[in-house]
Amino acid sequence: MSDNNDYQDNTFNLYQAYSYTLLLQVELHSFSYAVVHQNRLLVSARNCELSELADPKQLNDLLSATYKKVIIGLPATGFTLVPVSLFSEQHVAGFARFLDVKDHEKVLAQPLDRQNIIVFKADENLLTAVERFNFDNAVYSSKGWIKAIAKSSPTNNSLYIEVGEDILQFLNYKDGSLRFYNSFEFKNQDELAYFSAFVAEELKLNPVDTTLVLSGNVSKDDEKMARLSEFFGKVELNNLHVLEIPGQIAAHKILALAALSLCGSSEEL
């Protein structure tokens, strides 16, 4: 078992993997995983070495087990959203022209929600690393996070932010429908504040009346939260629970990973 384990339930037994679901949240330089049974978290670990996916050593037993279901969240090196009414499989290549696809990248497309298709490009090295798990089980990495927030009755003046190691993702709804989704690379809390203010301005959200709801790599009263509080009226952690998790795990820390459990299988177009 990996030294990066965050949690392991004492009932976890790999001999029962056939009844478990394995969730894999892949990033550009690392990955996180969780094992779930009947909506209950059994195992979770973050920031594992990416090499373990393609050639597992410490995680060989866990990653080689036969699971009832495997859901893989794939990161994008670029994406565009297309309304369902305008999308067709025959036009994927045309939409891909907006993404400046490189030789080492591959284009995928799948439903993001009921109104939008996401067309995104992914690094072929990452695709090779997870091909042993079957691409039919792969979804866009933030699909679960977006779905979880959509189900939570988001308010118009709430700006949802998933804070990664070097990527920020912003999400806003209006009257229950997706209004805005985008991502930005960032390095520190100042850039987090800048992009948050930029997105709020683009959406014409008054910072005083806007609630920032954060998940991911952030903690209560840390530098990120403190910096954002200088500009926005309310800054809080996202405490949505999509799985039954133990009290020692902060729900916002694993929200994007846990929310993969809300995703069904998808296929490459």
Image (cartoon, rainbow, N blue to C red):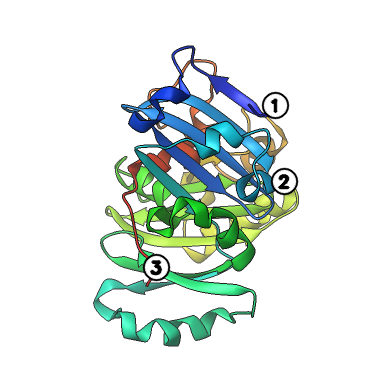
| 3 or 2: mark nearer the eye | 3
| 2 or 1: mark nearer the eye | 1
- Disc 1 secondary structure class: loop
In the rendered structure, are the residues bearing label 1 and label 3 in contact, judged by CB atoms less than 8 Å apart? no
Q: Which amino acid does label 3 sit on?
A: Glu
Task: Give residue 82's position: percent from left, percent from top.
Answer: 37, 74
Q: What residue type is labelled 1?
A: Asp
- Which residue is rendered at x = 47% and y = 56% of the image? 205
Residue position for label 2: 189
Tell me the quadrant of the picture where the C terminus can be found.
Answer: bottom left
Q: Is residue 239 above or below residue 176?
A: above
In the rendered structure, are the residues bearing label 2 and label 1 in contact, judged by CB atoms less than 8 Å apart? no
Tell me the quadrant of the picture where the N terminus can be found.
Answer: top right
- Which residue is rendered at x = 66% and y = 39% of the image? 47
Per the model, the C-alpha gap separating discs 2 and 1 is 28 Å
- Disc 3 secondary structure class: loop
Task: Give residue 79's position: percent from left, percent from top.
Answer: 50, 70
User: Of 117 and 69, which appears nearest the observer?
Assistant: 69
Residue position for label 1: 3
Residue position for label 3: 268
Is residue 157 visible in the rendered image? The answer is: no
Q: In this view, does 207 lie above or below 117?
A: above
Q: State which quadrant residue 172 falls in.
A: bottom left
Q: State which quadrant residue 154 falls in.
A: top left
- Which residue is rendered at x = 54% and y = 73% of the image? 106
Say whether disc 3 or disc 2 marks the residue closer to the N-terminus: 2
Q: Which amino acid does label 2 sit on?
A: Gln
